[in-house]
Amino acid sequence: MLLPGYDFTRDLAGAASEMEDLSPSQQAVINPTTIPLLHVNDITTLNASTQAVLPPETRAALVGDPLPAAFGHGTMVAGAVRLVAPGAKILPLKAFNSNGTGTLFNIVRAIYYAQEKGARVINLSLSSGTKSRELEKAIRFVSNRGVTCVASAGNDGLRTDDVYPAAISGVIGVASVNSIDARSLFSNYGQKIVKISAPGEEMLLPYPGGRWAGGWGTSFAAPMVSGTAAMLLSANPNTTVKDIQKAFTHAAPLEGEMGAGRLNVYQSLMGAWWD
């Protein structure tokens, strides 16, 4: 269920469509013909961006007027949540421009806004190499009020301790694995930033214009965990942030500083029940 959200990039209430980031000519091309394949790369300060790979006829129509780098990212992340928790209520908050850039001010505003509107889980498919006191303060504030924060570990393919908000205390940082439970080559890893891993390659996800897209990136692994957290809360609304964090220690073991292991929804649910 999609709730009325807020577009912090335009200061507009309501669930704004990502299509509004496109020019009229781009909208005309993307609506009827696009069959996109998206690949995510963390090339901006605070978010993974997306790059659409389009059929030849669509690429030709967009020559000189390419799609924005991060177009469709939010829609795909929300779709990943719905894969796991189809009954979850999703509050769409837009803190980034379509080129994948955003301000810390808008991100912090969105975190506070989500808690104020009753969110119990906040998915943060974004990353930065820079520590922020205000971001830490916002996450601590909402966590103390019963909100579970989940963040992507980033797509630099590095062992690192410096990816935020994944490295912030209390945040569930998520790395990406492939179909054979090996770390995705693009996924960051490390004891400080990764609490659990989840599928993040070849994800078939909704895309603007009523289309579907393939997605690669920790941005799409994180919402798998967020969706599972939503399921835990649905099963027991009294579940606490610490309960959810503990539930995610029940996972399929992995080597190489990939947290508790690969997400196993059944084990997490049963772990929460028996713990």
Image (spheres, rainbow, N blue to C red):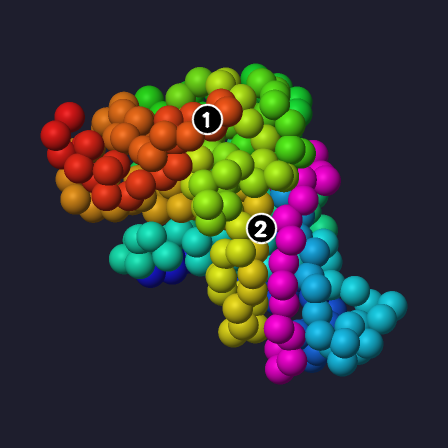
Q: How many neighbours does mark 2 have within 10 angstroms: few (below 14), some (14-19), or many (20 or more)?
A: many
Q: Nearer the viewer, residue 208 or 198?
A: 198
The amino acid at mark 2 is Trp
Q: Nearer the viewer, residue 182 or 20?
A: 182
- Please report the residue visible at 53 percent of the width from the left and 68 percent of the height from the top: 212
Q: Quadrant of residue 261?
A: top left
Work out which quarter of the rendered image holds the C terminus and state it: top left
Q: In the displayed structure, does residue 206 sit left or right of residue 241?
A: right
Q: Secondary structure at mark 1?
A: loop
Q: In the displayed structure, does residue 60 sit left or right of residue 205?
A: right
Q: Which residues are magenta?
A: 31-47
Coordinates of residue 225 in the picture (x, y in percent): 38, 41
- Please report the residue visible at 67 percent of the width from the left and 34 percent of the height from the top: 156
> Residue 216, labelled with which disc?
2
Q: Nearer the viewer, mark 1 or mark 2?
A: 1
Query: Is 60 one of the magenta-colored residues?
Result: no
State the separation of the CA atoms marked 1 and 2.
21 Å
Coordinates of residue 269 in the picture (x, y in percent): 21, 39
Coordinates of residue 238 in the picture (x, y in percent): 16, 34
Q: Are marks 1 and 2 in contact (CB under 8 Å)?
A: no
Vertical arrangement, residue 129 with respect to residue 125, above or below: above
Q: Secondary structure at mark 2?
A: loop
Work out which quarter of the rendered image holds the N terminus and state it: bottom left
Residue 46 can be seen in this image: no
Residue 180 can be seen in this image: yes
Label 1, on which residue? 255
Q: In the displayed structure, does residue 232 sit left or right of residue 166?
A: left
Q: Quadrant of residue 104?
A: top right
Vertical arrangement, residue 78 with respect to residue 189, above or below: below
Q: Nearer the viewer, residue 135 or 73?
A: 73
